[in-house]
Structure formats: C-alpha cells, structure tokens
Amino acid sequence: MARKFVHDTLEEVAAANGLRGKGEAVTFSTFVVMALGQHATINPEAKRLLDIYRDAYMKDRDIYAP
C-alpha cells in the first residue's frame, strides 16, 4: 500500500480513538485484528467480515506493491 496512505490512516486511527500517536495506533489495530479473529471462531458474521477485510487487503497489497 502507498506509504502516505498508511501514515495518514494511522494518524486518523490515533485521533479517532484517543491514542498517543501512530505507534499506539499500530498496537491498537493489532489488538482489534486479534479480537476480530477470536470472535470469528464463534461468530459467523465476524468471520465473514474478517474474510472480506483480508481479501480486500490482499487485493490492495497486490495493486500498490512496488
């Protein structure tokens, strides 16, 4: 993915969630992905969303990869 997009998004995540910057936004995002993965084991809707997000990421990664 484009570097500027990632950095801008991390700033937005930090601001929207009361975090202390991009580093904490990375940690928070990791926590959210882990939690969604745990919920996906017992909740079909969470699994469906995780699958959609994973597929979209993989497509974007292939499009924006150098």
Image: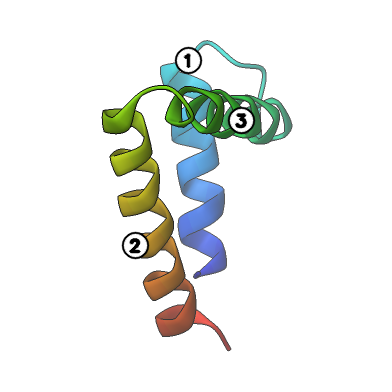
Which mark identifies residue 34? 3
Which mark identifies residue 8? none
In this view, the residue in front, 2 or 43, is 43
Query: Pointer 1: what residue?
Result: 17
| Mark 1 or mark 2, earlier in chain | 1
> Does the residue at mark 3 contact the one at mark 1 (Cβ under 8 Å)?
no
Q: Residues within 10 Å of mark 1 (few under 14, many from 20)?
A: few
Q: Quadrant of residue 12?
A: top left
**How much space separates mark 3 and mark 1, taking CA atoms?**
17 Å
Placement of 47 over or under 53, stated as above or below: above
Looking at the figure, which quarter contains the C terminus?
Answer: bottom right
Q: Give the image location of residue 53, x and y in percent.
A: 36, 50
Picture residue at 30% right of the left edge, 52% below the top: 52
In front of the other: label 1 or label 2?
A: 2
Query: Pointer 2: what residue?
Result: 56
Q: Give the image location of residue 36, x and y in percent.
A: 48, 28
Q: Quadrant of residue 25?
A: top right
Amino acid bearing label 2: Ala
Residue at the limit of the structure toward the top, as seen here: 18
Picture residue at 47% right of the left edge, 21% below the top: 15
Placement of 59 over or under 47, stated as above or below: below
Amino acid bearing label 1: Asn
In front of the other: label 3 or label 1?
A: 3
Q: Position of 13 compared to 53: left or right? A: right
Q: How many marks?
A: 3
State the SS at label 2.
helix
Residue at the limit of the structure toward the bottom, as seen here: 66
**How much space separates mark 2 and mark 3, taking CA atoms?**
18 Å
State the SS at label 1.
loop
State the SS at label 3.
helix
